[in-house]
Amino acid sequence: MKIAVCVKQIPDPATPYALDPITHFVVRPAEQVLDDTDRYGIELGLQLAEASGGTVTLVSMSPVGNLQGIRQALAMGADKAVVVNDPALRGSGALVTARVLAAAIAREEADLVITGTESTDGYAGVVPQMIAELLDLPALTFARKVTLEGTTLKVERQTAGGYDEVEATLPALISVTSGAVEPRYPTFKGIMQAKQKPVDQPTAADLGLEPATVGAAGSGQVISEVRPAPERSGGVKIKDEGEAHLEIVKLLERAKVI
Amino acid sequence: MSHQPVRPGRSDPKDFLAIDALLDDDERLIRDTVREFVADRILPGIADWFEAGRFPKELALEMGKLGLLGMHLDGYGCAGTSNVAYGLACTELEYGDSGTRSFVSVQGSLSMFPIHAFGSEEQKQEWLPRMAAGEVIGCFGLTEADAGSDPSSMRTHARRQGGDWVINGSKMWITSGGIADVAIVWAQTDEGIRGFIVPTDTAGFVANDIHHKMSLRASVTSELVLTDVRLPESFMLPDVVGMKGPLSCLNEARFGILFGVMGAARACYEAALDYAGTRIMFSKPIASFQLIQRQLVEMMIATNRGMLLAMHLGRMKDAGTLTSSHISFGKLDNVRTALEVSRTARSVLGANGITLEYPVIRHMNNLESVFTYEGTNEIHTLILGQAITGIPAFS
């Protein structure tokens, strides 16, 4: 079984993000790390591949930099990576990102596509569903538990009030939540071998995508302005003269918390 | 040559000299992986293990899976990392606790290394993969109750009887002795000092754990007693005779220590820095006071200096230019530095510094053992004295 896992290199969340003053795009340093939430998808992919004798291919789209984030993912045990690396992709919106990733996944002829639910630097949260639509695959999203029996994929889909039991036949796409599996540590042998693993770096054109259809231009969107979030206001002070709890209950009711 | 102006601005208080930039990608990834493992698996339990006097033996398999055990050895299930990577792993482990770092040092450098360096092919095949996996735990029997700094005066001896060896004697202060499946025991023979691979279930082998320790409490320390322990020839390490066998193992372990203790020092410095920033006295954080700032700065300088020394010696080891006297320099200076940092941190934390809620007194007590084991401060001083004068002052 061929499993494709979508991963993303992002600027280290420990350091503040910089935005380009003119384009407002995130400035991507050479040194980027693996998005921490991707580790769940990689772990799930590795478990399913180990159980079925399959392979795990990482699929990503970003400036490659020094590939540190991709190597982190390869060190966990993935077999190879495809990183679509093309300056023309700069400024791509969610739909163009999905088109590029879908084209890369199609080339790999994956039986199963695994993604996270959203990236930690973008938070659009729509790319997994878009990829599924573009590849004409069933999308089993927000999986908190995944089992594969033959070619039948069974998923517990996290909902606001509990979970749904959904299933589909391969090929399919699943997006996994952080509770689905416990990611493994990269092993030292894995770290030592990660540099020898193949990292294919096609351009958008290599994947058959016209330059005009990708990047900021192809996305048909412009970030016109970026404003800092407003400072939090002072809130409400309640002086307790024996009745403060009633005031608090009223506030909570108004906020529909209780 | 272009002139680069000195940049104004602050440094990262937790990596002041940007030593991170001296690491290559693999080293950084290994360092980060061990750091995460320590944060997930060691830090949450260490205060309780220390108080209960228990080594978390269940971690051995997890460490094996990660590749920590014998990580810088090649083949036989070992990862084959650089020496710097091994050193950095020791730093992160000892940021957790000197006991967990000691376990890894004893397993990789003192138990697996002699089999790897001096063992037969059959011995390597039999023992190393299971030891790398953490399925078999090793210990190293050199020191005796009356033979510490002068191990060549050991009384444990092995005699040939028929085709077998019969070993008698006892060993003292043996890390992991009571939990070990196999002991590397050094003994006098008619041919000189030799090493033996002794399965701990061999008749006549007994390990007695040492209790009432005030240091390395999350680590097992034992006495080994060998009474007519009979082993076939195939359990003797064939490729070394004399003190250079055990001493080469000690060089490996001391190398890990000179990195490791800087992890303990960093833990103490960071605890003191965080504490001084939040502890309010006279209506302001105690970090505002000049006397405290001086203590914080001295700790920061000492920790960075020690880490630079470790990195330099690590690069020399990878380049093949490191000598045993270089290791003495590092072991002597970095352990005493770490001990001093831990005591300063203990003072900055005031009364809170004596509880296990903070890591400092645990590290401080642990480092008293590290100060003594693997060559005391005095012995390393004499090794360095001999190195620069050419005159041995041992006797």
Image: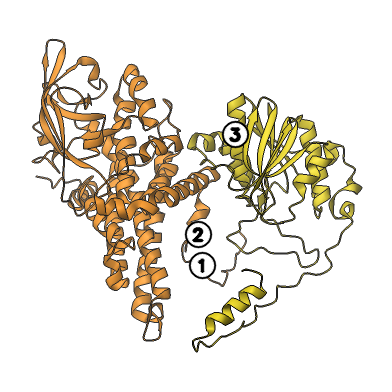
Chain letter, colour orange in render: B
The amino acid marked with disc number 3 is Leu
| Chain assignment, label 2 | B
- For chain A, what colour was chosen? yellow
Q: CA distance from mark 2 to mark 3?
A: 35 Å
Label at residue B11: 1
The amino acid marked with disc number 1 is Ser
- Mark 2: few, some, or many residues within 10 Å (few <14, many ≥20)? few
Label at residue B18: 2
Task: Quarter of the image for the N terminus of chain A: give it.
Answer: top right
Mark 1 lies on a secondary structure that is: loop
Mark 3 lies on a secondary structure that is: helix
Disc 1 and disc 2 in contact, CB within 8 angstroms: yes
Viewer-side residue, A128 vs B109: A128
| Chain assignment, label 1 | B
Q: CA distance from mark 3 to mark 1?
A: 40 Å
Q: Are marks 3 and 1 on the same chain?
A: no
- Mark 3: few, some, or many residues within 10 Å (few <14, many ≥20)? many
